[in-house]
Image (cartoon, rainbow, N blue to C red):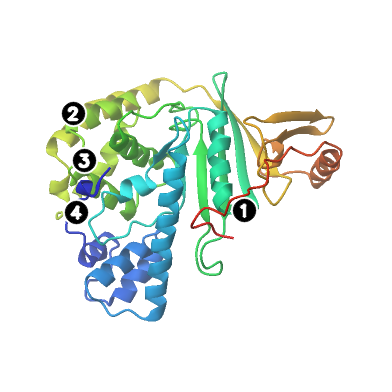
């Protein structure tokens, strides 16, 4: 994607006052305070717009904006690394940021990556750990109708550990998790990147209500030269069981008079039929449940281990899953008996160490945080 895919939509502080329901007569600091309360990390966008519109900024605001730009560059570089792993796809994040108008900063919470299988998942995490030291990882094992899938995430400190949210990369062997018992897991993304990004936005509705950031994301995509044709987007939303969610987001956008024209009538009208069909399907049938096991991390800091797969170790207390990055006690709920955790640590101590990759002999990749 090139800079020619940037939207020319007039994204302004005035618009953000409206989206965040802040009196436009109030100073920008009140808008910034409201942005910090919204899920989705909107403060950097406010700061970048303030800079572009010539609002007076002190050293604290300028430094925060600089750190957030560095954060965005960190994710952009990691996305480039990830693209070298066969089949790995980054969705949302830097991909959506390329549609934002020149001079604006779409803040990134983490990097979302979809991979074709387990081997690619550990390759992607290895690339992240080559750049960034970390001691925090998440692992979830899923079974969707007999097909195993994985979710894994690695987190590391932000530029300012006291002020900035942690960086993170989330990697899945599936595209869309759906909603248990209602919408099935869908393993693959659309081939077209813009469709994949927009449907990933719609999928977020299963986790939380849409926010101002989602509205801005969709507006920037639909007003860019890369905007998909309404019929193409409608067909994809129907195919991936996301027509109701995408229609809801489109209607949220159109509820703001100055944004209504950014969503084509053809798109909204085209989504109504597939949305009704999908709602009827959900009402009349239940998706097969997805079985899940959660990993309780047993080892830190994370290792840069050899291998492209997990090893499962069973003992009379339960199951330990060993991976190239860490070892985990597998559980099915949030509460874990401290005695079971202690037993898992004793069992792990008796196992052979996981083989490590050879020590790196070259300088760290530029931009690595230590």
Q: Which residue is mark 1?
A: 134
The crowding category of the residue bearing disc 2, from other C-alpha atoms within 10 Å (few below 14, some 14 to 19, many at least 20), is: few
How far across and how far down the image is residue 136, in percent?
63, 51
Q: Which residue is mark 4?
A: 256
Which mark identifies residue 226?
Answer: 3
Mark 1–mark 2 distance (CA, rounded to whole Å): 44 Å
**Secondary structure under the numbered disc 2 in the rendered image:** helix
- Quarter of the image for residue 119 reads top right
Q: Is residue 40 among what the camera can see?
A: no
- Nearer the camera: disc 2 or disc 4: 2
Q: Residue at x 45, y 55 (%)?
A: 74
Check if mark 1's residue and mark 2's residue have beta carbons within 8 Å.
no
**Secondary structure under the numbered disc 3 in the rendered image:** loop
User: Of marks 1 and 2, which one's residue comes earlier in the chain?
Assistant: 1
Could you tell me which quadrant the N terminus lies in? top left
Q: Residue at x 48, y 34 (%)?
A: 85
- Relative to residue 100, is residue 333 depicted above or below? above
Mark 1–mark 3 distance (CA, rounded to whole Å): 36 Å
349 vs 74, nearest the viewer: 74
Q: Which residue is mark 2?
A: 231
Mark 3–mark 2 distance (CA, rounded to whole Å): 14 Å
């Amino acid at each position: 994607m090139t800079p020619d895919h940037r939207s020319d939509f007039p994204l302004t502080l005035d618009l953000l006052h409206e989206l965040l329901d802040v009196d436009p007569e109030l100073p920008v600091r009140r808008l910034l305070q409201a942005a910090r309360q919204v899920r989705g990390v909107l403060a950097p966008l406010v700061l970048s717009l303030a800079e572009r519109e010539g609002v007076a900024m002190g050293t604290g605001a300028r430094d925060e904006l600089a750190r957030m730009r560095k954060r965005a560059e960190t994710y952009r570089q990691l996305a480039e690394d990830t693209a070298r792993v066969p089949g790995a796809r980054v969705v949302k994040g830097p991909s959506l940021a390329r549609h934002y108008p020149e001079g604006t900063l779409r803040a990134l919470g983490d990097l979302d990556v979809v991979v074709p299988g387990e081997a690619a998942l550990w390759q992607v995490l290895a690339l992240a750990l080559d750049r960034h030291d970390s001691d925090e990882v998440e692992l979830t094992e899923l079974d969707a109708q007999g097909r195993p899938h994985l979710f894994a995430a690695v987190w590391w400190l932000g530029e300012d550990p006291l002020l900035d949210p942690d960086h993170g990369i989330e990697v899945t062997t599936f595209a869309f998790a759906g909603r248990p018992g209602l919408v099935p897991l869908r393993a693959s993304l659309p081939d077209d990147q813009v469709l994949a990004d927009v449907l990933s936005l719609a999928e977020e509705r299963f986790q939380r209500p849409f926010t101002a950031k989602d509205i801005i994301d969709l507006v920037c995509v639909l007003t860019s030269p890369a905007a998909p044709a309404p019929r193409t987007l409608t067909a994809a939303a129907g195919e991936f069981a996301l027509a109701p969610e995408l229609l809801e987001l489109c209607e949220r956008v159109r509820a703001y008079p100055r944004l209504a024209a950014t969503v084509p009538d053809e798109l909204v009208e085209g989504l109504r039929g597939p949305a009704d069909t999908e709602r009827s399907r959900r009402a009349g049938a239940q998706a097969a449940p997805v079985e899940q096991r959660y990993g309780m991390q047993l080892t830190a800091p994370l290792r840069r281990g050899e291998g492209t797969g997990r090893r499962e170790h069973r003992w009379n207390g339960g199951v330990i899953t060993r991976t190239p990055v860490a070892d985990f006690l597998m559980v099915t709920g949030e509460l874990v008996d401290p005695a079971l955790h202690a037993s898992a640590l004793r069992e792990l101590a008796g196992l052979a160490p996981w083989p490590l990759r050879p020590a790196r002999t070259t300088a760290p990749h530029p931009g690595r945080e230590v």
